[in-house]
Image (cartoon, rainbow, N blue to C red):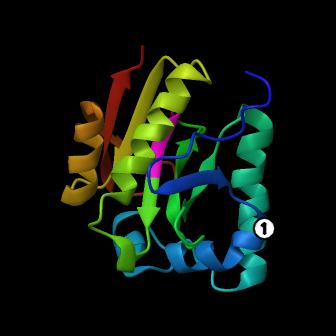
Amino acid sequence: MPGIEHPPATARLTLRRITPDDADLMLAIWNDAAFVRYVGDRGIRTPDQARAAIREGALRLYSDFGFGPYCMVLRADGTRIGICGLFQRDNLEHPDIGFSVLPEYCGAGYASEAAKSVVAFARDDLGISMLTAIVSPENAVSIGLIEKLGLRYDRGITMPDEDEEISLYSMRLG
């Protein structure tokens, strides 16, 4: 639908498109120990590198596909606590859902709340019929959320320029 740019707000969160002004948030996420362990080290260490990565990543996804990662913002006070959204990777046929919450906000259900909104947005507003998720097989917390959303293990895959096999999950929407 034209004009719908982001998933609807939840009880505790607003979800909005990421902008270059979110470079500090993305730096914190990309350099968080859990992100580096389970997703990988992006090698992004400065605000300028983060802004460039946002332009090449999130902004390009919005332009090319109409979706991307969304900033999770606490409705109570405007604090940015993480990201949750949709990605289209060159080596995967269908969009995948991804999320990352800053460590001090983990365990409060924010990722689950945001992910449910993103799944509904993908199905109801974007018309996406198949959703995937990629995850490190050691990341039990993320696997738990992915399965709670309704995605099921599909197979092991190796991403381009990576050596470690990761798990691909998928589900039909609608």
Picture residue at 64% right of the left edge, 45% below the top? 68
Depth check, front residue: 142 or 6: 6
Left or right: where 7 falls relative to 118: right
The spot of residue 79 in percent (x, y) is 56, 73
Q: Mark 1 is on which residue type?
A: Pro
Judge from the rendering whether residue 129 lies leftward or rightward of residue 172; answer left or right: right
- Image position of 154 with respect to 59: above or below: above
- Which residues are the magenta region? 92-98
- Residue in the picture at 61% in, 23% down: 125
Identify the residue at the far front of this view: 76
Q: Is residue 4 magenta?
A: no
Left or right: 108 as drawn, with respect to 125: left
Task: Give x and y (percent) for residue 166.
Answer: 31, 49
* Residue occupied by mark 1: 20
Residue that sits furthest to the top in the current view: 174
The quarter of the image holding the C terminus is top left
Pinpoint residue 170: horizontal percent, then vertical percent.
34, 29
Identify which residue is drawn at 80% across, 40% down. Answer: 63
User: Is residue 95 on the magenta stretch?
Assistant: yes
